[in-house]
Image: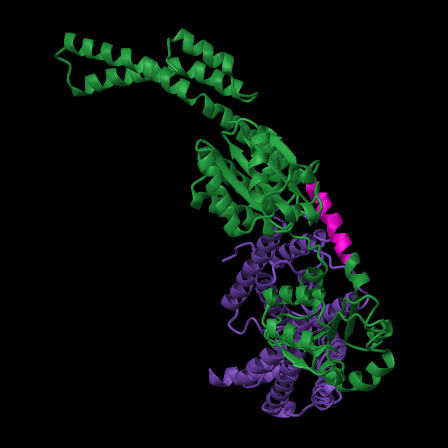
Chain colours: A green, B purple
Amino acid sequence: MKNLRMIGCSHRDAGIDVRQLLAFDAKQTADALGIWGSRFPDAELVLLSTCNRVELYATGIPNSETLVEALLDYRHVPSEQVEGNLLSLANTDAVRHLYRVTSSLESMVVGEPQILAQVKQAYQSAQEVGTTGPLLHDLFQSALRTARRVAGETALHKHRVSIPSVAIADLASCVFETFNEKHVLVIGAGAMADETLRYLRDEGEPHIHVINRDPERGKLLAQRWGGQYHEWSELWNQLVQADLAISTTSATEPVVTTSAFDKYVAPHRHQRPLIILDLAVPRDFEQAVSEALGIYLYSLDDLAQACKKNQSARAAELPRAEKIVTQETASFVTNAHHRATAPVIAGLRQELERPKKTELERLFRKLPDLDGPQRQEIEQFADRLVNKMLHPPMESLRDASQNGTPHGLLDAIRRLFHLED
Amino acid sequence: MDTGINMLCFSASYAIALALELSGLWVQFRLRRLALLLAAAAGLVAHTWYLGRRVAEMPAAPLANQQDWYILAAWALAVVYLTLKFYYPRSSIGLFVLPVVLGLIGGSLLATTEPLATFQAPRIWGQVHGIFLMLGTVVVLLGFVAGLMYLIQSYRLKRKLPADSRFQLPSLEWLERVNSWSLGAATLLVGGGFLTGVLSRLAQEGDQNFVPWTDPVVMSLAAMLLWLIVAEVFRLVYPAARQGRKVAYLTVAAFVFLLLVLAAVTLRDSLHQKTERAETSSSTAAGGLR
């Protein structure tokens, strides 16, 4: 491998302040790659920048310090500010790291699926700028393949671990066959409501209704999700209509008491199922509301418990995922080392092809009466002989490549067969 | 032509499918779902073959006797199961449907193989009566299974029991829809079966053309029909009975009535059996024709 290196930082080693200092948006990524590409014309470069990590992958750059310097220069960040927060990896470690990142084993929420698309996007951006080459092409393609293997051969991605995803995909979908045309009531306009609506939209096209004490924020949330805003006084009426209620207010007292629910809501619902996701702390719905027929009430604690269970299920899948990463890393490294032997093998073949050709011409001159099939048979014999002679050195090179580029063996072959560099 | 396919073949296939469904509660092994589908499909093929052979042997089959009637109902339910399994491959529907299929096949062993008396009546009434009641039975059983699943799913959600990939049920919304539909369809089918039964009885010749209202079979079927009509009216009038657990309870209760009817038909049926007099009169009629 031509000095494969990775430098960068992630949520594991650096706080958000450092990550923000080094973060790149799409435009800056293209610009930085262009500048670095001109500065290191022989190098291959890919920059991956997400909320949780900034990583620069490169080949053909003699040392990591040069790479760090280039990164910090572009962002105008003094090295003291990031001291101790940057990770630097080379060769096999860098390969393994990228595979782990792409397979979401390094993610903040292990198993989250977005990182695969982000890695793909990072490679495509570098390709557009023209800073990729054969090694990084192979590396990123194999990283994507590894991630797909991890997703397909393990259940790592199947267990949801975020509160909104568990609430919608694991619980609400047990009640509703589809979310299309469902009446979804959002009480409060907090970040959790926004996040839950995002998951909900992925699952269907419900009618969204927002109620909030602050009309400005309520209207904004309703507008963002194509919903309808209602005055706070409409709360009971909206609860009667709702199929799914998501509550995220910051009220210090329960917004919906059992007595009010029993009086204003339950009699008008006729036991029609209602799923309530109470994502507020402290709770917006009194626990006893769930005793009414057809009411399924989940608090943040209930959902957190489900998340915890899924996290354990994911953890159980980790060894299998790690095994795949280890296998793929070993395979990539062996192939990369073996690729380094390609020029020698090509030279060797050429060295043997030359006398073969000369000898065949000489033989055919001496035996002019040979017909077409006879000449072909002799040519095939010569080809087989050359291949058989090449087989042992190639096998030895392949075996030796598993432990790194076999420089000693390559030198010996060069000297034995008088191969030029 | 004896192909060697008998009741044991398809019963065993369904039993294997059920065992595979049950095993999924504890262990998840590769190709389990495929093996399950293959076992159920093999059972259905053998089942169909068996019924086809019965039709070839006896044109009045598969409604020629009580045993055939049970086996045909089990076949219809097995078809429903396989269809649902394709739509909901991960669900544990088989844990509920397959025991009912096996129960119907088991019930057929208790049922008589004597030809049903309805063939003495104008044949069309007898056939329509049999088909209506067979379909009504399948629909009530389906409603019962959906009702049971609804109650379990609702219990799990109410008690916030975590979702388990080894035991998945369809959504409450879907189950509720099946429950409501089954109640309505069962009322029509059982009503149709009852009416055609009365008509077929009245169409008979000689001293058989009356309805024995005190017969246990007639009484239990009338009670079941009455219950279905009351349940349907209750459902239409009382909004809370149109959804949720109430409709599930109604379908479970309909199943209890069905059990009574099946017990009366299987154990104490004098209504559908050929009487000596009827046989004599039919042979006389046949002789007269000759």
Rendered position, A158 above or below A386: below
Q: Let me know if residue B76 appears in the view.
A: yes
Would you say B197 lies left or right of A141 here? right
Q: Residue B127: image x %, image y %?
A: 56, 80
Rendered position, A266 above or below B144: below
Would you say A64 lies left or right of A235 here? left
Does the segment drawn in magenta span residue A341? no
Q: Name the image quarter holding residue A403.
A: top right
Which quarter of the image is occupied by the C terminus of chain A? top left
Q: Which residues are magenta?
A: A306-318
Q: Nearer the viewer, residue A294 or B93?
A: A294
Q: Name the image quarter holding residue B102.
A: bottom right
Q: Nearer the viewer, residue A157 or B130?
A: A157
Q: Let me know if residue B27 appears in the view.
A: no
Q: Residue A142: image x %, image y %?
A: 52, 38
Please name the residue shown 59% across and 52% down the image.
A114
Q: Nearer the viewer, residue B11 or B214?
A: B11
In the image, farthest residue toward the left: A369
Does the segment drawn in magenta span residue A307? yes
Please name the residue shown 74% across and 67% down the image.
B153
Rendered position, A391 above or below A213: above
Q: Residue A263: image x %, image y %?
A: 83, 86
Q: Nearer the viewer, residue A253 or B84?
A: A253
Please name the predominant secondary structure of the magenta segment in the image: helix
Would you say A189 lies left or right of A389 here? right
Q: Name the image quarter holding residue B130.
A: bottom right
Rendered position, B128 above or below A115: below
